[in-house]
């Protein structure tokens, strides 16, 4: 059962009140499933999911990306650097 | 020279890092904290970043610029944490033989930084604050290892 | 801030002079002495200028830029006399609300400086030297008071 | 008879060996005539005349510009600042 490390930034960090989470996911879980689970476990995150993208090991990945045990997943709301 | 830092940015050392004896032109871009955005008066900004990935993405932008323009070197510094009005949040320096490439490459680099680098800014006003939602980064259609 | 000077140029004071609290972007151009031009190895450059007219023409370029682009401010420093490889001969700083105007206006300003400002450079090589002939300035068809 | 002050720069300064000249010109003299006279009095300048433009009182002027007594004329070879 893959366990993933989830990083939170900016508004998500403020809303959830944590910089990091650990999520247990079923085998064969994708980024898409992780997003659903997040919305269920942290309803405050729900409104952000539509514009959120994810990065695994510091690279942006699509919703279909398969997650493995120990993966490092970052939740990336729309960026505004510069 | 690439860095994500909480310290004030030093333009002189960045320009010195990208300059070389074959370079006739250096273009340096300063992103500066404005006192106003969309009609609201800004007290200060707070920047957050996924630091390791942001640094990696700054380097990726630089690789993209080097592949696309005949430039000699590029360097980027991005400050995070609390920044007051008038302070510099971003420095991008590009050196090249001639000026046209330096201008075009530097402009392109700033655009790509804003599109790809995981950094966020919160505007703090007299009566509240808000994390600014800018670009949704492009995600590859198919994952590298998926 | 506009100057023709024999002293090394100071980018920091120029940027500070053009920056303002409404500005989100500053673009700073450095013209730098290259070690090579058209295949010849350059030892150093010697700049001459019609100083009073050059200063007037720098201000005219700035007026042209302000009329053409929505920029906040522009400043130009040009160094003359002997300059070694790697030294900065020209600094052009443009500030504006957003980056696009700052890049475009700064590039335009550098082009116009090279087309209109009476300054000349002599390249000095190991085995000789030459005053470089660049642009023939455009002359009005009819004189103002003629 | 207009007497004009002439400024020399860059290569012209090197060739003529002076930064300034004074030229006496006939009444009604233009920039065009001044250029001719310069070529006659300073033959080293001759090869530069075709690309030379002139400025009077710090403004570029056309060949037909009329010169007056005391005018300040600068000889401007092709510029190469920046």
Image: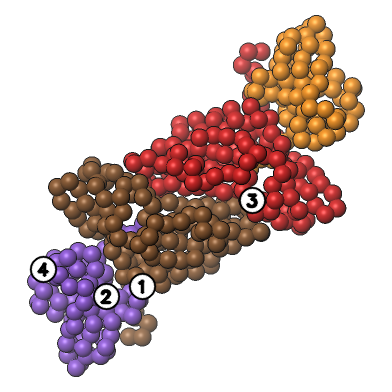
Chain colours: A purple, B brown, C red, D orange
| Residue name at image x 58 percent, y 44 percent | C9
What label does residue B53 carry, if any? 1
Mark 1 vs mark 3: same chain? no
Asked if the residue at tag 1 contacts the one at tag 2, i.e. Cβ–Cβ closer than 8 Å, the answer is yes
Residue, disc 3 = C87
Residue, disc 4 = A44
How far apart marks 4 and 2 lie (CA) works out to 17 Å
The mark total stands at: 4
Res A70 seen here: yes
Vertical placement of A55 versus D66: above or below?
Answer: below
Figure quadrant of residue D43: top right
How far apart marks 1 and 4 lie (CA) works out to 25 Å
| Residue name at image x 53 percent, y 67 percent | B67
Vertical placement of B138 versus D12: above or below?
Answer: below
Q: Secondary structure at mark 1?
A: helix
Res B68 seen here: no
Q: Tell which subunit mark 3 falls on.
A: C
Residue, disc 2 = A74
How far apart marks 3 and 2 lie (CA) works out to 45 Å
On the image, the x and y values in percent for residue B126 come to: 17, 46
Q: Secondary structure at mark 2?
A: strand
Asked if the residue at tag 2 contacts the one at tag 3, i.e. Cβ–Cβ closer than 8 Å, the answer is no
Figure quadrant of residue A81: bottom left
């Amino acid at each position: 059962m893959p366990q993933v490390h989830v990083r939170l930034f900016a508004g998500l960090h403020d809303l959830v009140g944590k910089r990091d989470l650990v999520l247990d996911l079923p085998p064969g879980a994708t980024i898409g499933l992780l997003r659903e689970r997040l919305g269920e476990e942290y309803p405050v995150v729900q409104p952000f999911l539509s514009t959120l993208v994810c990065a695994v090991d510091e690279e942006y990945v699509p919703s279909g990306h398969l997650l493995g045990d120990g993966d490092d997943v970052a939740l990336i709301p729309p960026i505004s650097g510069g | 020279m690439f860095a994500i830092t909480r310290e004030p940015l030093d333009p002189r050392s960045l320009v010195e890092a990208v300059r070389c004896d074959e370079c006739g032109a250096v273009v340096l871009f300063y992103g500066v904290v404005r006192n106003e955005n969309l009609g609201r008066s800004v007290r200060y900004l707070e920047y957050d970043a996924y630091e390791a990935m942001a640094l990696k993405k700054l380097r990726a932008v630089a690789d993209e610029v080097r592949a696309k323009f005949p430039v000699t070197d590029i360097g980027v510094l991005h400050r995070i944490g609390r920044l007051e009005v008038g302070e510099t949040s971003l420095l991008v320096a590009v050196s090249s033989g001639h000026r046209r490439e330096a201008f075009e490459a530097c402009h392109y680099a700033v655009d790509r930084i804003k599109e790809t680098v995981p950094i966020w800014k919160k505007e703090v006003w007299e009566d509240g604050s808000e994390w600014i939602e800018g670009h949704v980064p492009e995600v590859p259609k198919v994952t590298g290892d998926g």
